[in-house]
Amino acid sequence: MSKIFLVGMPGCGKSTVGKVLAQQLGHLFLDLDSLIEEQEELTVPQVFEQQGQTYFREAEARALRLAVASHKKIVLATGGGAPCFCDNMNFMVSSGLPVYLKLSPQELVQRLSPLDLQARPLLRDKTPAELLQYLTDTLHQRELFYDQAFCMVEVGSASVSAVSDK
Ligand code: S3P
């Protein structure tokens, strides 16, 4: 399969696993948030602050379609919300192989460092209890989309290479 899309919540390891998988397959690794930052010449938090989330979602959909049109063999780590907007999940299903990396909200909280939280506008400035509640509610809503992936990998405590080998 020439185009693999990694989907899942922030902190599930899409970029880390994606880099290893791309190397194993001889594909190009792309990170959708980085592509948006190049396209907009702003960081993700700046796009949210200056243009708002609706604009971010449109920019995200544009960057996704451009990446698919521009490269043959890619492993693309999407942002956690990407599958849920602008018909992106249908687009990924029809363009390649979406793979859902699954982690529980409790595991996500453990993995997200203060720096990770700061870099993610939707996760910032929350108490630990609010963060857990947000991740639980959001995962519940997003799984409708994530579950359309070709396959799901339970990330749990597995090592990066164990996940990419699956
Ligand atoms: C978002 C996740 C982020 C980034 C943006 C919005 C989300 O990507 O796209 O902050 O809606 O969950 P990661 O999943 O790589 O953190």
Image: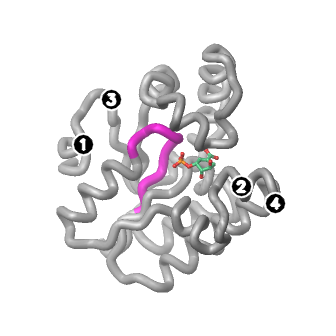
User: Residue 20 lies in magenta, yes or no?
Assistant: no
| Amino acid on which the number 4 mark rests in the picture | Gln
* Circle nearer the N terminus (3, 2): 2
- Residue 53: x and y in percent read 77, 53
Residue range (magenta): 5-13
**Quadrant in the picture for the N terminus:** bottom left
Disc 2, disc 4: CB below 8 Å? Answer: no
Name the secondary structure under disc 1.
helix
Marking on residue 112: none
Q: Nearer the viewer, residue 155 or 93?
A: 155
Question: Label 2, label 4: how many angstroms apart (C-alpha)?
Answer: 8 Å
- Residue 62 versus residue 94: which sits nearer the camera? 62
Q: Which residue is mark 3?
A: 156
Distance from the alpha carbon under mark 4 to that under mark 3: 35 Å
Q: Earlier in the sequence, mark 2 or mark 4?
A: 2
Q: Tag 3 or tag 4, which sits nearer the N-term?
A: 4
Residue identifier under label 2? 46
Which amino acid type is shown beneath numbered disc 3? Gly
Which mark sits nearer the N-terminus, 1 or 4?
Answer: 4
Residue at 65% across / 34% down in the picture? 123
Label 4 environment density (alpha carbons within 10 Å; few <14, some 14–19, many ≥20): few
Residue 78, given in percent of the width and then of the height, sits at: 50, 57
| Percent x, y of residue 36 | 60, 66
Image height of 124 relative to 39, above or below: above
Mark 1 to mark 4 CA distance (whole Å): 35 Å
Circles 1 and 4, Cβ within 8 Å, touching? The answer is: no
Q: Main secondary structure of the magenta part?
A: loop
Q: Which numbered disc flags the more N-terminal residue, 1 or 2?
A: 2
Which residue bears the numbered disc 1?
160
Q: What amino acid is labelled 2 in the image?
A: Gln
